[in-house]
Image (cartoon, rainbow, N blue to C red):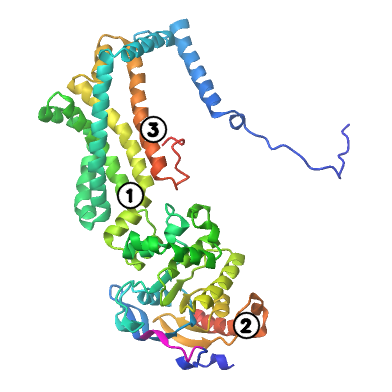
């Protein structure tokens, strides 16, 4: 199988595109318990590319995401977004978490402009309302701008949090298992929505997930990570055509790719 | 002989509903009050099991309730006493809220507060605070100030604890969100932690509303003065038990008013928290 071979980073379909996020020789050591969470991570995200990372618990993928989002400093290495080193949270980084994390005392619209309000004040937030409404229409929540989060379903709440992530036009989207709290049917639907939104916005996205099927259906490339110490052991280019559909889950090619990743991770689990 | 049931008939049966679920709440409350008053009447007026000095009959109590009510309505000396106590309670609640909230933020938001201040607060909180009453009287005299101080002293601690607990209530995800959108510490405090903590803070305010009443009346028992507590003590010392009962009932109206004022404010401010309706007393 060709996909089993580690490929150079330029092999992906987005090879011609401009690099957006670059990580070189990244490592993270927690001094307190002498734990090496990450070692020798190299990674480049190109404009418009969707990259996922999969791996068992404790393989360092959450640590990697936190470093990429500027929430945690690296121990060694270079972390560069749009030519500027990441030394803290930035407004050109959009984040999405497992929970929608909408503030219950703010309407959907007010939640979406929260990042602008925090960074640039109320006047700028008011000026962002037209764009927020546009984003709400993009995710199909046009009629829910003035509704409080308690009245939104789980899937709708996560769609609102997609808008909040997109409001500041981020250069990269960091997605931390964004739909893992949703039921399976909603999750499939939301993944297709995410694909559509990323395509429309030409977004560069980085997804951390436990679900191999989710990673395969969404990604151009998948990075497989292993723990002790946390490292990237293989990069798999997903050659399924775009746009992806849920029916592709039943194709032999999809099955092969999932089986291959499961095999890689399974070996680790029993070693 | 029983008829064979028709196997094609609809399976319709009625789920049993308990009596208490079928009657309106006010009916249940009135029924309970009626039973209690009937037993009370039986024990005092009808059978005289209890001496009237210990427990007056419902009729005597009602007569005194009407008398005290008339005095209050006509602006007599009792209204003046009630006004004194109301002022005491109002100022004590305000001071307790200001001090309790400030110390609560100090303890809940800063490491210094949590590590250095909190142990002292816990130590003071475990003391029987009423025992400080003579000190407050010695420091502030027999006027309203010593009662305000005692009442505020008692009511401050639940507000400190609930404010500090409220500041811890924001979830890890919410903190991470605020960090990732570059919120400063003050922004995180005012835009996330305080609003999230409001339900906790209001729980503390409700406990404080009860505490401030107890503190004000205790202060008036011990320090004399013009308040309702002094009236109750005078009536008790002349064995005028019906009057004591009547005064306590009117006093409870003051406590209820304060409690529901807090509950009303909570309903306005914490409109998103459906689980915490003021109707559910507590």
Seen at 48% across and 18% down, the residue is B36
* Residue A264 visible in the shown view: yes
Q: Work out whether B66 lies above or below A18.
A: above
Please tell me the numbered disc located at residue A254. 2
Tell me if B257 is positioned left or right of B14 in this view: left
Task: Characterize the local packing of mark 3: few (<14), some (14-19) or many (20 or more) Cα atoms within 10 angstroms.
Answer: some
Q: Work out whether B245 lies above or below A85.
A: above
Q: x%, y% of residue A59?
A: 43, 77
Please tell me the numbered disc located at residue B165. 1
Tell me if B82 is positioned left or right of B19 in this view: left
Secondary element under disc 1, as helix, strand or loop, is helix
Q: Does the magenta stretch include residue A31?
A: no
Name the chain letter of the residue that bears numbered label 1: B
Report the Cα–Cα distance between label 2 and label 3.
Answer: 62 Å
> Is there a contact, CB below 8 Å, between mark 1 and mark 3?
no
Q: In which quarter of the image is residue B84?
A: top left
Name the chain letter of the residue that bears numbered label 3: B
Q: What stretch is highlighted in magenta?
A: A14-23
């Amino acid at each position: 199988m060709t996909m089993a071979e580690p490929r150079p980073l330029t092999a992906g379909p987005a090879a011609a595109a401009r690099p957006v996020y670059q990580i070189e020789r990244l490592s993270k050591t927690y001094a307190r318990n002498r734990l090496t969470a990450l070692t020798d991570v190299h990674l480049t995200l190109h404009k418009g590319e969707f990259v996922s990372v999969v791996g068992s618990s404790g393989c360092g993928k959450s640590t990697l995401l936190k470093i990429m989002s500027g929430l945690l400093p690296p121990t060694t290495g270079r972390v560069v977004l749009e030519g500027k080193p990441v030394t803290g949270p930035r407004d050109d980084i959009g984040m999405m978490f497992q929970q929608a994390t909408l503030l219950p005392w703010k309407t959907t619209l007010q939640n979406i402009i929260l990042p602008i309000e925090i960074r640039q004040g109320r006047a700028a937030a008011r000026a962002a309302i037209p764009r927020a409404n546009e984003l709400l229409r993009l995710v199909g929540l046009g009629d829910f701008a003035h509704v409080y989060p308690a009245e939104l379903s789980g899937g709708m709440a996560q769609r609102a949090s997609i808008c909040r992530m997109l409001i500041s036009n981020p250069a990269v989207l960091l997605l931390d298992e964004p739909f893992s709290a949703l039921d399976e049917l909603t999750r499939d639907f939301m993944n297709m929505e995410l694909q559509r939104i990323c395509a429309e916005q030409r977004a560069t996205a980085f997804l951390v997930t436990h679900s191999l099927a989710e990673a395969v259906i969404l990604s151009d490339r998948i990075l497989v990570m292993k723990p002790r110490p946390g490292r990237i052991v293989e990069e798999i280019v997903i050659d399924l055509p775009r746009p992806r559909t849920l029916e592709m889950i039943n194709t032999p090619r999809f099955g092969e790719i999932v089986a291959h990743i499961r095999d890689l991770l399974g070996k680790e689990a029993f070693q | 002989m029983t008829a064979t049931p028709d196997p094609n008939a609809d399976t319709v049966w009625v789920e049993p509903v308990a009596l208490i679920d079928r009657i309106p709440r006010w009916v249940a409350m009135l029924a309970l009050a009626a039973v209690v008053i009937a037993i009370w009447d039986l024990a005092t007026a009808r059978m005289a099991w209890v001496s009237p000095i210990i427990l007056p009959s419902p009729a005597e109590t009602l007569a005194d309730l009407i008398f005290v009510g008339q005095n209050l309505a006509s602006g007599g000396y009792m209204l003046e006493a009630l006004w004194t106590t109301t002022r005491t309670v109002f100022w004590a609640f305000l001071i307790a809220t200001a001090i309790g909230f400030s110390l609560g933020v100090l303890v809940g938001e800063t490491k210094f507060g949590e590590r250095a201040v909190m142990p002292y607060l816990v130590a003071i909180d475990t003391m029987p605070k009423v025992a400080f009453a003579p000190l407050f009287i010695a420091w502030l005299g027999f006027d309203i100030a010593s009662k305000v101080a005692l009442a505020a002293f008692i009511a401050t601690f639940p507000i400190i604890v609930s404010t500090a607990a409220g500041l811890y209530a924001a979830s890890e995800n919410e903190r991470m969100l605020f960090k990732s959108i570059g919120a400063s510490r003050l922004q995180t405090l005012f835009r996330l932690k305080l609003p999230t903590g409001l339900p906790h803070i209001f729980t503390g305010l409700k406990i404080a509303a009860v505490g401030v009443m107890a503190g004000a009346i205790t202060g008036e028992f011990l320090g004399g003065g013009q308040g309702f507590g002094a009236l109750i003590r005078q009536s008790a010392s002349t064995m005028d038990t019906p009057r004591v009962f009547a005064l306590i009932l009117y006093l409870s109206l003051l406590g209820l008013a304060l409690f529901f004022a807090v509950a009303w404010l909570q309903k306005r401010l914490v409109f998103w928290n459906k689980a915490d309706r003021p109707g559910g007393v507590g």
